[in-house]
Image: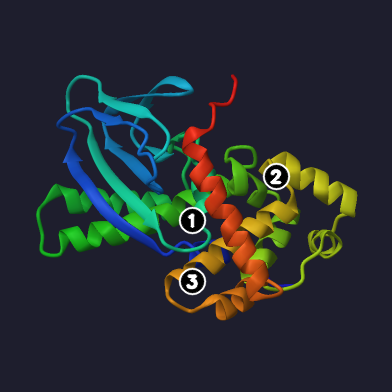
Amino acid sequence: MPQLDRLGAIVDGLSPHIHILTAGPMAGDWPCPPAGGHAGLKLFLVLEGRVRWRGMGGEQMLEAPAVVATADRAAGHLARTGNPLPSLLCAELRFDGPAGGQVLDAFAEPLVLTLSDCGDDLRHLLGLIRAELAQARCGRGALLERAGGILLIALLRHVIARPGLGRGVLRALADPRLARAIVAMHERPAEGWTLVRLAERAGMSRTAFASAFRDQMGCTPGHYLAELRLAIAERHVARGDGLQRAAGAAGYGSPAALSRALGRRRQRLTARPSAAPAPR
């Protein structure tokens, strides 16, 4: 049996747009206020020196190499700690693909990692970025943007290879059994997946699969699949494909069913700003 590619379908569904915010010596602190309605991910790669990260989980001192990955909606503060100035690569990623929401949810709480035990892929990438920052050469901006995309994949690999490190879909992908079901949903979202079929895909009983999925993902398999299908349909509609084609691509029984789902989504988004904050 061929080895399962736990990230291929998810990465294919991201369609990232990468913008390098800064690269080189850290000239000032980086306040990261929540970005309201924006949906994106910020990566802070510490290449040299030490920094201090302060976020919802408290304060951490980070020695290079290290990385902070955080969704825009999460607040945080990255500060330098004396001399010499730390060297950073800061990238902003926006996702146009249907898997973007699932990946962003995994970084709703910032992921803060030291990379001293990183694999060869990350080690080589860090060396490439350091060399590029050491001298100005033609095409530097384009190279760093591509390096940002490779960094994202290498980081996702690093997380799913360490069970318990990630959150959301990244935490679930670290379990090979759940990963088989998640990959199947992303590869064939319009297929008639049921709880029984997904459990069979995972090689688990229906009860064990449903329980493990909820424990790792914080939602049911049905909810996860429904959100993925709706994201796919929304992107087809945004491209002007029409409800008929969008419904077929996303696995809805009819354009009317998709229209109702889109209406419910609009109602939720409209009601969200006025909703009372959840109690803590």
Tell me which amino acid carries mark 1.
Gly
- Classify mark 2: residues with Cα within 10 Å, few (<14), some (14-19) or many (20+): some
Mark 3 vs mark 1: give the one in front: 3
Q: 111 or 233, which lies in front?
A: 233
Tell me which amino acid carries mark 3.
Val
- The mark nearer the N terminus, 3 or 2, is 2
Which quarter shows the C terminus? top right
Mark 3 vs mark 2: give the one in front: 3
For the image shown, how many numbered marks are present on the structure?
3
Give me the disc on residue 219. 2
Q: Name the residue under label 1.
A: 100
Q: Name the residue under label 3.
A: 237
The reply to whether discs 3 and 1 touch (Cβ–Cβ < 8 Å) is no
Report which quarter residue 154 is drawn in: bottom left
Residue 56, percent from left and from top: 46, 24
- Label 2's element? loop
Residue at 89% from the left image edge and 48% from the top image edge = 207
Q: On the picture, is 125 further left or further right than 180?
A: left
Residue 21, percent from left and from top: 22, 46
Residue at 51% from the left image edge and 65% from the top image edge = 234
- Label 3's element? helix
Tell me which amino acid carries mark 2.
Cys
Residue 211, percent from left and from top: 81, 43
Report which quarter residue 240 is drawn in: bottom left
